[in-house]
Amino acid sequence: MPEELVVETEGLTKRFGARVALDGVDLSVPAGVAFGFLGPNGAGKTTLIRTLLGLTRASAGSMKLLGLPVPEQRARALQRVGAIVEEPRFHPHLTGRQNLQIIAAARDEAARGRVDGALRRVGLADRADDKVKGYSLGMRQRLGVARCLIADPHLLILDEPTNGLDPAGIQEFRAMIRGLVVEEGRTVFLSSHLLDEVEKTCDAAAIVDQGRVLVQGTMDQLKGTGTGANEVIVGVDDLDAAQRALADDPRVGALNEADGALRVTFAGDPAFAAELNRILVQAGVAVYRLEPVRQSLEQRFLEITSRLEAVPA
Amino acid sequence: MSTALMTARRMIGADVAKVGRRAGTVVWAAVLAILPLVIYFIVAAIQHSSNPTSDRPAGGAHGFSIGLQILVFFFGPLSAMMVGVQAGLGDSAAGVFRELVVTGRSRLSLFASRIPGALLVALSILTVAFAIDVIGTIVFRSGAHDPSAGTILKSWGFLLLSDGVVCVVVVGLAAALDSRVASLISFIGCELILFPALVNDNGLGSFREVFLDSAVRHIDPAPLSNDRFHVPMTTGAVVLTFVLWTAIACALGAWRTWRLEA
């Protein structure tokens, strides 16, 4: 059965005069995950979101939201999409509840009935009748999510949602997003320039730079499909003996000592780690630790974006 | 009730809430509509009590007409403008227009719902002001004749129509200009200075029919006997003037809302 996609773009291009903000973007966002759209500032993240939501017109290419072609069926598609584009804005003279009721009026008949639940879901029920001009940035972000939830959305599109939040607020926000995905089965499309945020919040991601999607996949795929090199930390009783035992093996690449252990790099099958253990034991070296080194998204991101910079224009 | 009608009702209710709950706008609109009437009745009553032979009673049919002129031609339009500008620009000024657009609701329907929303707020305020005109007419009549019930009802309708048209025009043009300051300055300048000056220029002849002021004066049910701004017009020309002003302003507002960067 084919995977259900909530966002699909093919060759999506957006030009502002001579400047190309989106350059043939092909993107596939599966349903039921937190999907990170990761890229540096100015990479085209907000432009893609604005184009998907019909706030600006695409110059070329095609796109679908929840399986519906947009802009042709934009109104129908957006009925089940909630979005925060850049910072969430409200009527400051109205309360949080009144602001949600105003948006609910523009949505379907049932939306008004979801206002209280949405306020409770984001932890704003106690402050719902305060005027928004008295809200902190974190509260506004949460109210923005509540505004998305009154559509009972299949897809939430959040553009840099943790901008300006303090560490506690970021952690709270991250937990809320995970809850929306895991407990409620919604899809969250989260754009961010913060690697750590995407790594900790998302199940899958796309890395974008200069208007192009460079790579996309699950977090494990993104971290593991780099140079094809594997790295393990090997804790042994005799470092010199271990280095001698492995030095002549052609499968072993780099061999470095670090923090009283060996860092061994090898190409090909990750199962070679077991072979390493056997070689060392046969050489009379006691192995007490064998730990694969996980490549962080940050390493992968830098690797990919630096590769892009190396490509001649 | 059909889904479209229910949606329209919800959206109009939301627009009434947006404008009606903005205390600054509503209070100033009410002050502009009501305070000049109160001042007129007090001053005229003092003048009449100090010199009853030369100064007419503040109330009665004459006082009612003066109160109506104050409301229809000067401070009622200002009040309607304040509400109209807020309705026309409130969403974009607060940055909420984008949030409304991403609901999938069409921009034209977002613009259209502002008009009845603004009218409901503005006409409610003007009705209160009109009630004060009627109360002042009765309280300060001092033996003068009251206007008939028919004249009062027609005058109320006249007020709602004339200042309602101003309100609709301002909603459209404010949305088109997309600037609160530019909108208020240009509307006040035109309504209180430029258009009255042009209507009073006999050299302009029938060209003066294009001004709203001329059409409004033509249907005044309780005009003052010395109305020097009266421009002879046919009923068809009056209707056409009202329709053209509202249609052009709404078309401009709708066009700008359609094109506005959200």
Image: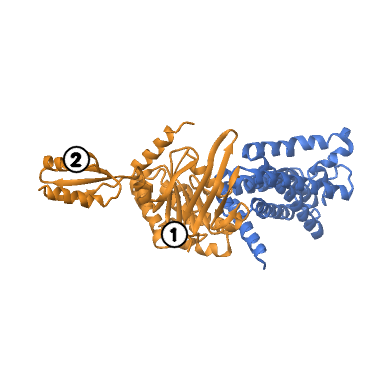
Chain colours: A orange, B blue
Q: Is residue B129 left or right of residue A265?
A: right
Q: Is residue A206 left or right of residue A80?
A: left
The chain carrying label 2 is A
Along the viewing direction, whichever of A55 and A261 lies nearer the viewer: A261
- Image point (60%, 42%), residue name: A59
Q: Amino acid at mark 1?
A: Gly
Q: Give the spatial CA distance, label 1 vs label 2.
A: 48 Å
> Is residue A269 in view?
yes
Q: Is residue A275 left or right of residue B69?
A: left
Residue, disc 2: A248
Pick the quarter of the image with the C terminus of chain B: top right
Residue, disc 1: A32
| Secondary structure found at label 2 | loop
Residue B46 in the image, given as x and y percentages of width and height: 70, 44
| Position of A81 relative to A110 (above/below) | above
Q: Amino acid at mark 2?
A: Asp
Residue A263 in the image, given as x and y percentages of width and height: 21, 42
Along the viewing direction, whichever of B77 and A230 lies nearer the viewer: A230
> Is residue B104 in view?
no
